[in-house]
Amino acid sequence: MDRTSTLTSTFALLRFILVLYIFSSVYGNSEGDALITFKKQLSDPYNVLQSWDPSHVNPCTWFYVSCNSNGSVTRLDLWNMSLTGRLVPQLGQLTNLYYLEISGNKITGKIPKELGNLKNLVSLDLYMNQLEGHIPSTLGHLQKLRYLFFNNPGLIFPLYVPPPQSRDVPVTAPAPAPAKPL
C-alpha cells in the first residue's frame, strides 16, 4: 500500500468511528428508552404519541415532554388523552422529572415502586385512572413532592407511609361511598 491509500483508509476508519459514536449517543438516551418502553405498554387510539420516535435525537423533541437546558426530561403532560395500558418501572429512571401528569386516562395495574426514585418530583397526578393495588411506600421518600392526586377506587393506601419532612402534602383520595337510604 502506498501512503495515499493508507491515509484514505485511516480517514475512512476515523469517519466510521465518529459516525458510530454519534449514533451511540443518539440511540443511547436512557430517558428516551424509558419513555419508549412506557409508550409500548400503552394503547394510543388517537395517535397523540406519534412524535415519540426512538430515532429522534432525544425525547425533548417529542410532544407532551418538556426538558431542562441540559436535555433532561422534567415534565410529562399526558392528561386526558384516552391512553390505556400500564405504568412501567422504567419511569423511575426519569430522575430529573418534576411533573408526572397522567390523569383522566384508563391506565390500569399497579403503581411501580420505582416512581419513588423520582427525587425531584413535585407533582404526581394519577387522578381518574383505573389503578389498583397498594400505593408503594417508596412514594413517601419523595422529599420535594407537593401535589399527589389519586382517585382510583382500586388503590389501597398503606398503613404507614414515612412522613414528609416538615411539609404539608395535599393528597386526594377516593371519596367515601354515599350513605344508602334506609
Image: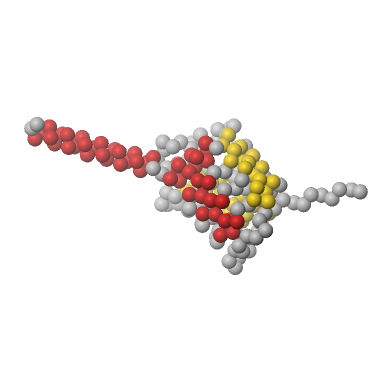
Could you tell me if residue 145 is visible in this image? no
| x and y, in percent, of residue 87 in the image | 57, 43
Dividing the picture into quadrants, the one containing residue 78 is: top right
| x and y, in percent, of residue 65 in the image | 50, 44
Please identify the residue farthest to the bottom as the structure is shown: 166
| x and y, in percent, of residue 5 in the image | 12, 32
At 44% from the left edge and 50% from the top edge, which residue is drawn?
72
In the displayed structure, 162 sits above or below 127; it is: below
At 67% from the left edge and 49% from the top edge, which residue is drawn?
155
Q: Is residue 118 left or right of residue 10?
A: right
- In terms of depth relative to the viewer, which is nearer, 108 or 61? 108
| x and y, in percent, of residue 44 in the image | 57, 34
Dividing the picture into quadrants, the one containing residue 19 is: top left
Dividing the picture into quadrants, the one containing residue 129 is: top right
At 52% from the left edge and 36% from the top edge, which residue is drawn?
40
Count the marks: how many?
A: 0
In the displayed structure, 19 sits above or below 140; it is: above
